[in-house]
Amino acid sequence: MRQERKGEGPSFEITPLYRYLSFPSEDKEKQSWVADIFLKHQLFFPSRKSFNDPFDCVVPNLLDTPGVVVKRFAEQFVERKFPNASLEDKLANVSKLISVESLESLRLDVQKAVDAAGILCLSRPRDDILMWAHYADKHKGLCVEFDGSANCNFFGEAQQVEYVNYHPWPLDEEAERQMARAILTKSTHWAYEQEYRIIRPDGASNLIDFPEALLTGVIFGYLMPDNLRQIVTRWATEGRCRVAFFQARPRVGQFALDIVRIA
């Protein structure tokens, strides 16, 4: 996202990132998460266990990794770890590393770290009708806008999700990088989301402070009840949030939304 111009210092592309939110009147917990954004300037970082895709953030079965990849990883690992060991000992350690038990233990260790991480999911589009349907209570919720430009603290840390069908698991990477790769890789089925994620190791189910100036906009779903819109507007005022307000409206004659500034 950083752009360099000849003869000038570094400049940054302005990158808004969006968080779709449901706001059901009967769900006090979800309402409290929305209130915390405006009143406390905090965001809830859920565990991947609450995600709607059961394949999301799951470390793949390492037994499916091609044998040549596993063997090469084991040989390189043993050579680094035991450079002065005898050839017999090195071969024994390689055999132990490529065993079913060892590979499953490695997978479980990485999965444990993934499960403990807090993951904030953000998106580039603000007008995707599927996103509104899936994540904003069937267009009855809202969408909040943040400044995710690369030079900004907090949201500038957001990393882009990669959408793939399959790729070999990187056994030779450090455990922390393996954890991040699991969190930042999704099926191509979800590519329309254009997702970015902020990862907090061991931060699952925590509320985390964000710079209040980076909250820049609020978009009301086109089916959001008036009383709920009034609640959000009041919270934004009480929290002294300097935000623009928008309304999502169906585009005439198309399966699309227009995002219209209202305040």
Image (spheres, rainbow, N blue to C red):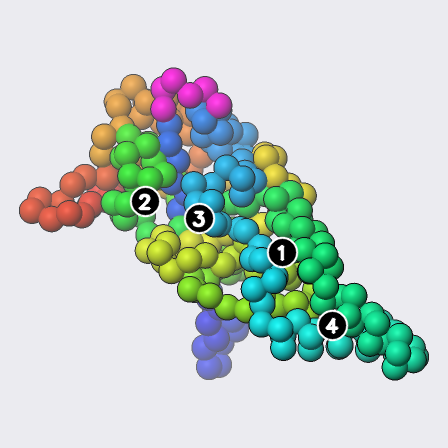
The disc, 3 or 1, on the residue closer to the chain's N-terminal end is 3
Residue under label 2: 131
Residue under label 3: 122
Question: Is residue 88 shown in magenta?
Answer: no
Tell me which amino acid carries mark 2. Met
Residue under label 4: 74
31 left or right, relative to 89: left
Residue 172 seen in the current view: yes
The disc, 3 or 4, on the residue closer to the chain's N-terminal end is 4
Q: Are marks 3 and 4 in contact (CB under 8 Å)?
A: no
**Which residue shows up at 84% across the image and 72% down it?**
92
Provide the residue span drawn in magenta: 24-29
Which callout, 1 or 2, points to the residue nearer the camera? 1
Dot 2 lies on which element?
helix
- In the rendered image, residue 228, in percent from the top left (x then y), is placed at 32, 22
**Which residue shows up at 38% across the image and 60% down it?**
188
Which callout, 2 or 3, points to the residue nearer the camera? 2
